[in-house]
Image (cartoon, rainbow, N blue to C red):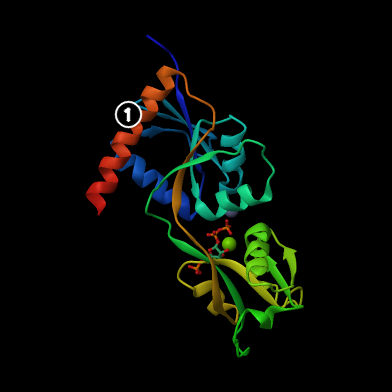
Amino acid sequence: MSDERLRLAIQKSGRLSDGSFELLKSCGLTISRGRDKLYGRVQEMPIDVMLLRDDDIPAFVADNACDIGIVGQNVFEEELLSGIHDTPANEVMELGFARCRLMLAAPKEWSFDGATMLAGKRIATSYPALTKAWLEAESVDSKVVMMKGSVEVAPRLKIADAVCDIVSTGATLDANGLKPVATVFESQAILIRNALKFSPEKQAIFDALLKRINGVLRSRD
Ligand code: PRP
Ligand code: ZN
Ligand code: MG
C-alpha cells in the first residue's frame, strides 16, 4: 500500500470557502481540522486539505506546494495574465458555485456612455492584469491603480475616478455610491491542478475525487 496523499488547497474563509466545504461534504467527505488550523485531513480518502487565502491558491498549486485547488476563475486568470509562473496550474473544470462578475463601476452621477469615457481616468482594482487586458481590448488608455482591498472606497477618497471590482449582489457598490457600467470578466469557482504528471497512486486518488465531484455537479443540474 502507498502512503501517497493528494494535497488540496481551499480558501480558509470567505465566499469561496463555504461553497468549497459544501462541495466536499456533498462528495461524502468529512474534514477533520482544529479551529484556525492551516491543515485538515479528509477522513474517507487520502487527501490533505490546506486552508489558504484565495489569492495564494494559484501560486501554491503552480509551485507544487499543493496538487490541486479550488479557486475563483478571476483570481486564477489574474495570476495567469500576470505571467509570474513559467508553468502555471491548469484549469480542470468549472464548479458552478461562487458565481460573480469583475465589473467596472463608476460614481452613480456619471452618465456612462461607453468605455471611451474611462480614457485618462484612474481605475482602482485588485485585478490589474484583467483590468488592463480589458482596457487594451477596448483601446482605452487609463491609469490602473492597484489596491489589495476596500477598492470601493477609492472614488470617495479621490484615489481613483472609477473601480474594477468583484460584484456579487451589487450591495457593496450601491452602499458606496457606485454603479456597474461594464463586465470585464465572468467568474465562478474552478478546480485547478499542478501541471506535472501525478504518480499513478496520486492520479488514482484524483480520479476518484473527480468522479465524486462530477456526480455531485450532475445531481445539482
Ligand atoms: C468582493 C468585492 C466586494 C464584494 C462585493 O470581495 O471586493 O467587497 O465581494 O459583493 P456584493 O456585490 O455582494 O456586495 P470578495 O468577497 O471577493 O473578497 P476579497 O476582496 O476580500 O477577496
Ligand atoms: Zn482575496
Ligand atoms: Mg472585497
Q: Quadrant of the C terminus?
A: bottom left
Q: Percent x, y for residue 191?
A: 44, 43
Name which quarter of the figure residue 163 lies in. Answer: bottom right
Residue ranking furthest to the left = 219
Which residue does the image show at 56% across and 79% down from the upper left?
181
* Left or right: 143 as drawn, with respect to 15: right
* Amino acid type at mark 1: Ala
SS class of the residue under badge 1?
Answer: helix
- Asked if 30 appears above or below 146 in the picture, the reply is above
Choose between 63 and 147: the one closer to the eye: 63
Choose between 204 and 174: the one closer to the eye: 204
Residue ranking furthest to the top = 1
- Asked if 115 appears above or below 23 in the picture, the reply is below
Choose between 72 and 33: the one closer to the eye: 72
* Left or right: 6 as drawn, with respect to 85: left
Indicate yes or no: mark 1 CB to ligand 2 under 8 Å: no
Q: Is residue 152 visible?
A: no
Which residue does the image show at 60% across and 90% down from the upper left?
111
Question: In the image, ligand 1 is in what quadrant?
Answer: bottom right
Name which quarter of the figure residue 177 lies in. Answer: bottom right
Check disc 1 and report the residue beneath it: 208
* Left or right: 60 as drawn, with respect to 101: right
Which residue does the image show at 56% across and 35% down from the upper left?
61
Mark 1 burial class by Cα count in 10 Å: few <14, some 14-19, many 20+: few
Name which quarter of the figure residue 28 lies in. Answer: top left
Q: Is residue 82 visible?
A: yes
Q: Percent x, y for residue 12?
A: 52, 44
Q: Percent x, y for residue 197?
A: 50, 25
